[in-house]
Image: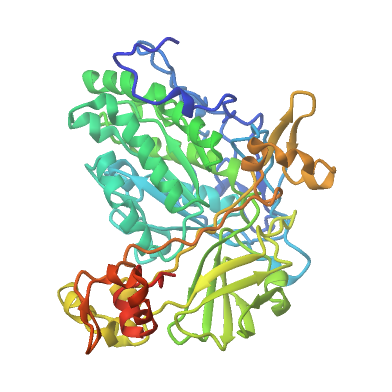
């Protein structure tokens, strides 16, 4: 449909991919698990909704997408299974969806574990519910989160929620693992954008899935420039995928509202463009997909014209459940595992490696698969219960050094046992050395002006000068040429087609296969010369740092205190 320039948000056409990904799979995958004879099937919720929800909102401002009440299951699910399903190795995808090459994986891997008993255990899937009061669950304990937990548990997933809030919990309320969320009542897109970075830094675990529903308060509060709301939403998704590039963001359009004026503005300036924004991000390789809650939750299930009732939240949970099963199986998605972060403990005796997805016990517990340079040694390795964190016992690490970690032979927990991306990773031992580094904000400025405190507490004082970028991943497939069509990136090696890596477009799509990953070290903003003059010697006296660049003064940079005060002029930034 044509979009009037007066109302269309400023989304550049160049950002839209030429081939928009298909967000609607041909069939919904179904992950089933074995039930013991004692389990009563009548207590289990229906695994499949009776009809697949529409994947695109109506683009006509005057025509509202039809809501089909027949999507609801014939009976409401039990609030909590009387017995959690056993996570047996029979969990596997029976139907594999088809996706566009640039948007989503071509198939969801089976969750069938290996024959080792330690591999039978299903790994935890961490979900972040992100939004406003609808996410919090206004009026209904747990909102959609309670139903979603029950549905996915019955499907063979092991679920934990992450977030900073526990308000409006569902029983048992003392179990924070299933009650955390970031649903902030009455808040707007801008509020989420301003706070999401701080919230994510407090999460104990990185989310595997982020369920995003935000924006209705922008229109309900009649904020200025509502035509720009979709661009704010686009920027928010940009920030989320930068902060958590390994998480799958499942983003929804806005639910219907009873107030006609507000509803018409949503139909005119927001919902028609939501799927285009999602497709744009998917075309860039971001793990972003669309769910059409507007169509799945009719207005009749919103008594106050804004918040769903229990039945409405159940329909929301069914829609999110379907969307989740398209991209993540109980033991992870089918993207190759990557190292997300590396931490070194203060005593330099333990390292924690956080992977992007659950890893296979057998491959991780082999100490020969890990090596550190510079005479550092590894004495033990352990995979924790989340199956994402690897703890190494290390020796001979030195404070303030940069190291290289080499990994090999590591695989994820899916049936395909995908190999990890890249075998060398950079990390630094820039750490606070003592507990005394813990000072409040008022004391930091005074304390960090003391040379010895700054040396002992580089993290507190912000003087660590080494950072690296680790994210580098092949797209699922790329178009080689009109004649050859699309190929998996890894086939460039297997099918002797690596000469195509000369093409810049292919190198960008397949950086791992083509050896085009670029891992940069960047100079921290704290690396700068002192504005005060420094004392060169008794004879010369004090000089500005920039004078050290002249040949007659360059000898001064041999002195540690001068190099520390004038790192730029002494070429000492690392």
Residue 321 image position (x, y, % from top left) = 52, 42
Q: Which residue: 41% across, 25% down?
A: 12
Q: Is residue 89 visible?
A: yes
Q: Which residue: 61% across, 82% down?
A: 374
**39 left or right of 264?**
right
Residue 149 image position (x, y, % from top left) = 48, 52
Q: In the figure, 184 relative to 378: above or below?
A: above
Residue 291 image position (x, y, % from top left) = 48, 33
Q: Which residue: 47% across, 55% down?
A: 207
Q: Which colour assignment does the render follow?
A: rainbow
The furthest residue to the left:
442
Q: In the figure, 313 relative to 86: above or below?
A: above
In this orientation, which residue lies closer to the viewer: 498 or 59?
A: 498
Count of marks, rendered view:
0
Image quadrant where residue 366 sits: bottom right
Quadrant holding the C terminus = bottom left
Quadrant holding the N terminus = top left
Residue 416 image position (x, y, % from top left) = 75, 54
Q: In the figure, 393 relative to 315: above or below?
A: below
**465 left or right of 85?**
left
Q: In the figure, 103 relative to 109: above or below?
A: above
**231 left or right of 118?**
left
In this orientation, which residue lies closer to the viewer: 433 or 365?
A: 433
Q: Is residue 95 visible?
A: no
In this orientation, which residue lies closer to the viewer: 20 or 515?
A: 515
**244 left or right of 442?**
right
């Amino acid at each position: 449909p044509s979009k009037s320039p007066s109302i269309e948000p400023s989304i550049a056409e160049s950002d839209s991919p030429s081939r928009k990904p298909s967000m609607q799979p041909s069939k919904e995958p179904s992950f089933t698990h074995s039930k013991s004879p004692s389990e009563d099937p009548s207590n289990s919720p229906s695994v499949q909704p009776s009809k697949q929800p529409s994947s695109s909102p109506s683009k006509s401002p005057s025509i509202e997408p039809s809501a089909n009440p027949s999507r609801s299951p014939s009976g409401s699910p039990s609030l909590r299974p009387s017995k959690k399903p056993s996570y047996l190795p029979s969990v596997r995808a029976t139907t594999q969806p088809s996706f566009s090459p640039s948007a989503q994986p071509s198939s969801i891997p089976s969750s069938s574990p290996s024959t080792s008993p330690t591999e039978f255990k299903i790994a935890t899937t961490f979900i972040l519910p992100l939004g406003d009061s609808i996410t919090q669950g206004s009026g209904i304990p747990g909102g959609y989160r309670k139903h979603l937990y029950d549905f996915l548990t019955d499907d063979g997933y092991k679920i934990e929620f992450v977030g900073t809030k526990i308000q409006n919990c569902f029983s048992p309320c003392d179990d924070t693992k299933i009650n955390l969320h970031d649903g902030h009542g009455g808040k707007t897109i801008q509020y989420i954008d301003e706070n999401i970075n701080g919230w994510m830094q407090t999460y104990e675990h990185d989310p595997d899935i982020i369920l995003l529903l935000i924006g209705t308060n922008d229109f309900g509060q009649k904020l200025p420039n509502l035509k720009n709301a979709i661009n704010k939403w686009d920027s928010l998704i940009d920030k989320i995928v930068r902060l958590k590039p390994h998480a799958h963001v499942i983003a929804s359009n806005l639910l219907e509202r009873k107030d006609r004026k507000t509803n018409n503005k949503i139909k005119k300036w927001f919902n028609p463009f939501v799927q285009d924004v999602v497709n744009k991000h998917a075309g860039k390789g971001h793990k972003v997909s669309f769910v059409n809650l507007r169509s799945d939750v009719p207005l009749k299930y919103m008594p106050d014209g804004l918040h769903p009732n229990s039945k409405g939240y159940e329909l929301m949970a069914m829609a999110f459940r379907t969307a989740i099963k398209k991209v993540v199986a109980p033991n992870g998605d089918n993207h190759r595992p990557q190292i997300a972060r590396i931490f070194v403990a203060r005593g330099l005796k333990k390292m924690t490696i956080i992977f992007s997805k659950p890893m296979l016990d057998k491959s991780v517990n082999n100490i020969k698969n890990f090596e550190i340079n510079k005479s550092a040694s590894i004495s033990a390795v352990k995979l924790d219960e989340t199956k994402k964190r690897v703890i190494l016992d290390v020796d001979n690490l030195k404070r303030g050094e940069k190291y290289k970690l080499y990994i090999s032979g590591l695989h994820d927990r899916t049936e395909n046992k995908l190999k990890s991306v890249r075998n060398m990773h950079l990390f630094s031992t820039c750490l606070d050395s003592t507990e005394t580094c813990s000072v409040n904000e008022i004391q930091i400025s005074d304390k960090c002006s003391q040379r010895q405190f700054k040396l002992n507490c580089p993290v507190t004082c912000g003087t660590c000068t080494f950072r690296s970028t680790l994210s580098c991943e092949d797209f699922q497939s790329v178009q080689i040429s009109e004649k050859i069509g699309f190929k998996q990136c890894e086939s460039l090696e297997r099918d002797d087609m690596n000469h195509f890596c000369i093409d810049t477009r292919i190198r960008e799509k397949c950086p791992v296969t083509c050896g085009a990953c670029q891992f940069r070290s960047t100079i921290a903003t704290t690396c700068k010369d002192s504005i005060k003059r420094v004392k060169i010697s008794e004879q010369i006296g004090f000089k500005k740092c920039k004078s050290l660049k002249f040949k007659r003064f360059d000898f001064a940079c041999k002195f540690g205190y001068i190099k520390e005060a004038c790192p730029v002029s002494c070429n000492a930034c690392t």
